[in-house]
Image (cartoon, coloured by chain):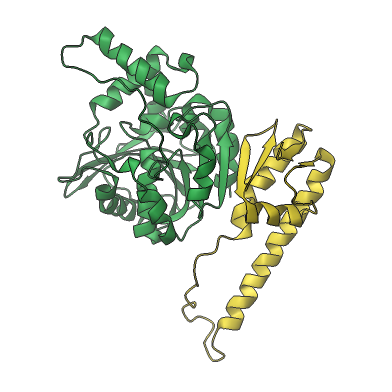
Amino acid sequence: MLYKFKSKATGDLIMLEPQGKQILKLIGKEAGAKGIILPTEMMSAIDALHAAVEQEELAIQAAKEAAREPNTPPDAAPIADGPRAISLKQRVVPFIDMLRRAHAEDKEVVWGV
Amino acid sequence: MEIRRVEALSERIVQTYAWGDTVWHVWRPCARGAKESAELTHNTNHVDASTKPLVLLHGGSGSWTHWLRNVEHLSQYRTVWALDIPGFGDSSLPAGVTDADGLVPYMAEILQHTFLGEAVDVMGFSFGGMTAGLLAAEYPKLIRQLILIGAPGLGIFGKELPMRGMTPDMDQAAQRKVHRHNLATMMFKHAETVTEDVIDLQQANVARDRLRRRRIARTDVLARAQALWICPVHGVWSECDALYLHTLEQVPQVLTQLASFSVVPDAGHWVMYERPDAFHGIVDSLLKR
């Protein structure tokens, strides 16, 4: 299943199911097959996404620090990253922009309709 | 003519490599007005570190002019480096290169030389997107962020489009008719987007295309390369892309490594020409960071 987010103010944004569900959960929406984000809900949704990004960054930072050898000097080469993971920060940029534009034009964002 | 006006705002940089010359056009955020006094240069040691470079790679049978309606907007906030990909436009074709995969080491050399190892943002349209995606896989340190626009190489093309060919006996009018048909068939949603100026642009670009036997766009070469991507890669496709007429929604399912997938409404394959404002609305949020 794909989540296809649409708004009269912007183009469509398409997400794979896990990513779509994750973002809807973060903004407090039920990740059903259909749904709507009202303009009045958008600013708090953007705040929630920013907060989640910040949290993820802190968690990544903490994980990197925890993974260092105890006696490794701080300027040592960083430990090689594991398999590539696309950060929430990268994923949410177009979605936040969509919410901003829709809010500015007082249009809702819908999916599954 | 629009091409001359937009080109006059740029700095044309010719770089000489062992295998031939490469041509960039560069639009800088603060260069307006000072352009006339700018001297053409053959070295690029003056890269302005305060403005992150944005590299634009055009589509097949194209040149920097594929970005004609975009460079002024983008250069309001980024230093825009539009390349004539080797074998297209005014850039030389390296000996033995016949397709995007063969171009990759040459593209790597160009980026390495031009930006002195700094990872840059790259936006690639169609063939240029496929080439950039292969480059990001083989030379991940060169690219900071990649935006693919209507890129092929996913293995999900439908039927061949009803394109028309040229024959040597065709006069100018007949040739222009073929260009008009082909542009309307493949590049645009709205036939009226194909103005006489667009046909001029296309004619000039097609005449300089020296990679005519390329084939890998119909394979899944880009889909296979994505496993090696390190940088964030975003996809921007058009709603009515003739190459993805019934397969648009398969794109994010095939390119699972995309960080985002946006669709520009009411536009065909050459989306950034047909709907520049809607296109900018999407890429600005990715490029202004």
The quadrant where residue A18 appears: bottom right
Asked if residue A36 is positioned above or below residue B272 in the image, the reply reads below
Identify which residue is drawn at 72% across, 55% down.
Answer: A49
Q: Colour of chain B?
A: green
Residue ID at (56%, 60%): A86
Residue B38 visible in image: no
**Residue A39, visible in the rendered structure:** yes
The answer to whether residue B42 is above or below residue B201 is below
Whole-percent x, y for residue B232 in the image: 51, 55
Residue A47 appears at what percent x and percent y?
A: 77, 53
| Residue under the image location 23 percent in, 33 percent down | B212
Badge count: 0
Percent across and percent down for residue B89 are: 28, 32
Q: Is residue B140 above or below residue B50?
A: below
Q: Which residue, as the protein is rendered here, is positioned at the far bottom?
A: A71
Q: Residue at x 21, y 34 (%)?
A: B210
In the drawing, does residue A44 fall left or right of residue B286?
right
In the rendered image of the structure, the colour used to display chain A is yellow
The extreme right residue here reads A40
Q: Nearer the viewer, residue A20 or B187?
A: A20
Say which of A65 and B71 sits in front: A65
On the image, the x and y values in percent for residue B276 come to 53, 28
Q: Quadrant of residue B265?
A: top right
Tell me the quarter of the picture where residue A64 sits.
bottom right
Name the foreground residue: A98 vs B188: B188
Q: Is residue B89 above or below residue A80?
A: above
> Which quadrant does the N terminus of chain B fall into?
top left
